[in-house]
Amino acid sequence: MTILQSKRLTPFGKYRVFNYFKRIEFQHRGSPHAHILLWLEEAPKDILGEEKEQAIEMIDSLVSVSASEASGNIKSEASGNA
């Protein structure tokens, strides 16, 4: 988590992780997986109110998805299957 909290090496652009919560769980066959919650500096606080547009911009800058790499549950808007 140190690299996520770095001001210079953060993968979140202008957003730096200043706090986090993580929980490691194990599935029935012993495979580990993590649940992680991050608090980002400079992130909008009122995401449903006055800072809604900034929140959308932040999410758009940090999250992407590729239909070709997805599990088959994503439909392309261009094909009319949205």
Image (cartoon, rainbow, N blue to C red):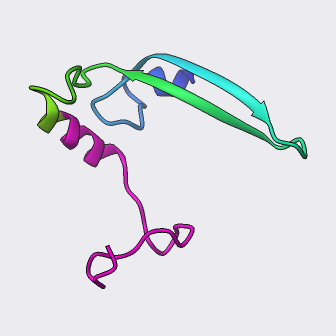
Q: Is residue 61 magenta?
A: yes
Q: Is residue 35 above or below residue 28?
A: above
Residue 36 horizontal side relative to residue 47, left or right: right
Q: Residue furthest bottom?
A: 79
Which residue is pictured at 48% across the width and 75% down the height? 68
Q: Quadrant of residue 16?
A: top left
Q: Is residue 4 above or below residue 81?
A: above
Image position, residue 14 (x, y; %): 27, 31
Q: Residue furthest top?
A: 19
Image position, residue 63 (x, y; %): 37, 48
Which residue is pictured at 53% across the width and 73% down the height? 72
Which residue is pictured at 37% across the width and 55% down the height? 64
Image position, residue 50 (x, y; %): 9, 26
Which residue is pictured at 34% across the width and 79% down the height? 81
Q: Is residue 27 magenta?
A: no
Q: How many marks?
A: 0
Task: Give the quarter of the figure containing the N terminus.
Answer: top right
Residue 1 horizontal side relative to residue 38, left or right: right
Q: Nearer the viewer, residue 40 or 46?
A: 46
- Magenta residues span 55-82
Q: Residue furthest left?
A: 50
Question: Magenta segment, principal secondary structure?
Answer: loop
Q: Nearer the viewer, residue 63 or 50?
A: 50
Task: Give the quarter of the figure containing the C terminus.
Answer: bottom left
Image position, residue 49 (x, y; %): 13, 27
